Image (cartoon, helix red, strand yellow):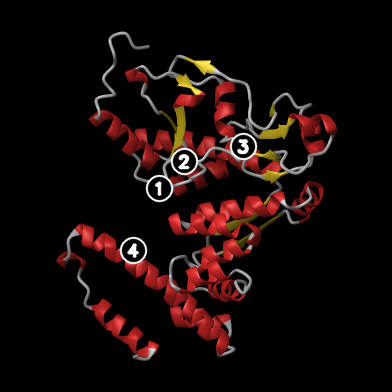
């Protein structure tokens, strides 16, 4: 059997002459999947070889052109999988990436679930699910204390001379700020598009950040606390009883009790499954319905995500009528789904081709 190094050299030579234009699109799609799997396997093998050589992460970073942190994470992922043989095998044969393996290792009790997610999709959903499992296994009061201990804000000047800012906030402060900021950016982005500006959304976000932190703009905040009714009455949550901020993880029940005194806070009490049913037959959503949609699916109520298979994007969602309004569909919780802009466009085009966007004579 040829040496692995020789095989690697042969592959590199073949890839240097690869011309996608000489292949059909479906062949390129299949090849992209095969190369991605090979890349994952090579990354894991390179990390293992570096560990065996007792070399530093900086050595691996120089070899593959990554950062020392990325190299360190890849090496740590390999080391952390000794007690997770299924995940380790999936990493070694390229089915999952080192980053996905590292996320699974953070919640080893849920290896089967997370490994299925990793094989079926990208890194984001795996990291989110692993984080949620890890946070739920922590004592809410201890977690709350750690979140406050680690909050910080720092700034520095980069190589271009721009000012960079890094801020970490506990969820009861950070989540409403992010929601407030994203709404403001969405409004500014729509104005920029209407005005014909050819700027990125990230640049618009920077402009909005300066405006809002300088005292201008709308300062309305929005945060949703989810608490099991039994935990709320008892004063503390038992296993399996949700008590968290959407987008921010578990919190102590006493934080919900204190927040309930604020008239500007949304508080949703539930019994594990049932929440207030809201129905509205117009196109626009009442605030109560929007709160119910933002909760996400029962029983975890972890917040809305793009419901297209494999996407799971959490921010900048657009609310789509599963059965379009023009086809007689109501604006109700059962008929609305959160989609990212890309998937919403695909869904609209599918509805158009299916003839569902032609208003019914007796429709609403």
Asked if labels 4 and 1 touch by Cβ distance under 8 angstroms, the answer is no
Q: Nearer the viewer, residue 146 or 168?
A: 146
Q: Can you tell which of label 3 and label 2 is closer to the viewer?
A: 3
User: What is the secondary structure assignment of the residue under circle 2?
Assistant: loop
Asked if labels 1 and 3 touch by Cβ distance under 8 angstroms, the answer is no
Q: Can you tell which of label 1 and label 2 is closer to the viewer?
A: 2
* Mark drawn on residue 301: 3
Crowding at dot 4, Cα within 10 Å, few <14 / some 14-19 / many 20+, comes out as: few
Residue at mark 4: 33
Identified at 44% across, 73% down, the residue is 93
Q: Earlier in the sequence, mark 4 or mark 2?
A: 4
Residue at mark 2: 306
Q: Can you tell which of label 1 and label 4 is closer to the viewer?
A: 4
Q: Nearer the viewer, residue 223 or 288?
A: 288
Residue at mark 1: 200
From this view, report whether residue 194 is shown above or below residue 247.
above
How far apart are the two marked residues, 3 and 1, measured between alpha carbons?
A: 32 Å
Q: Can you tell which of label 4 and label 2 is closer to the viewer?
A: 4
Residue 125 lies left or right of residue 1; in this view the side is right
How far apart are the two marked residues, 1 and 2, measured between alpha carbons?
A: 22 Å
């Amino acid at each position: 059997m040829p040496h692995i190094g020789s095989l690697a050299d042969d592959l590199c030579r073949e890839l240097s002459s690869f011309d996608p234009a000489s292949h059909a699109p479906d062949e390129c799609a299949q090849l992209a999947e095969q190369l991605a799997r090979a890349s994952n396997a090579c990354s894991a093998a390179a990390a293992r070889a570096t560990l065996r050589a007792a070399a530093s992460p900086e050595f691996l970073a120089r070899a593959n052109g990554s950062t020392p942190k990325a190299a360190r994470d890849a090496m740590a992922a390999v080391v952390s999988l000794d007690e997770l043989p299924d995940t380790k095998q999936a990493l070694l044969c390229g089915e999952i990436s080192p980053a996905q393996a590292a996320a699974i290792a953070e919640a080893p009790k849920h290896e089967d679930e997370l490994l299925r997610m990793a094989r079926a999709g990208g890194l984001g959903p795996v990291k989110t699910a692993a984080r949620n499992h890890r946070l739920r296994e922590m004592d809410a009061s201890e977690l709350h204390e750690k979140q406050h201990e680690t909050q910080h804000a720092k700034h520095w000047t980069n190589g271009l001379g721009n000012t960079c800012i890094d801020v970490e906030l506990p969820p009861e402060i950070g989540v409403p700020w992010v929601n407030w900021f994203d709404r403001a950016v969405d409004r500014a982005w729509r104005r920029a598009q209407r005005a014909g500006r050819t700027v990125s959304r990230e640049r618009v976000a920077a402009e909005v950040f300066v405006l809002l932190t300088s005292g201008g703009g709308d300062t309305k905040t929005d945060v949703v606390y989810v608490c099991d009714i039994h935990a709320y009455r008892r004063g503390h949550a038992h296993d399996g009883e949700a008590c968290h901020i959407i987008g921010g993880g578990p919190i102590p029940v006493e934080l919900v009790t204190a927040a309930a005194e604020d008239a500007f806070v949304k508080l949703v009490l539930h019994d594990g499954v049932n929440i207030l049913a809201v129905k509205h037959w117009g196109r626009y959503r009442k605030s109560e319905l929007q709160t119910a949609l933002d909760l996400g699916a029962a029983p975890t109520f972890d917040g809305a995500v793009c419901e297209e298979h494999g996407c799971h994007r959490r921010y900048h969602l657009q609310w789509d009528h599963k059965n379009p309004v023009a086809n007689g569909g109501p604006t109700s919780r059962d008929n609305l789904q959160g989609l990212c802009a890309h998937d919403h466009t695909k869904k609209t085009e599918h509805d158009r081709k299916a003839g569902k966007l032609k208003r019914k004579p007796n429709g609403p």
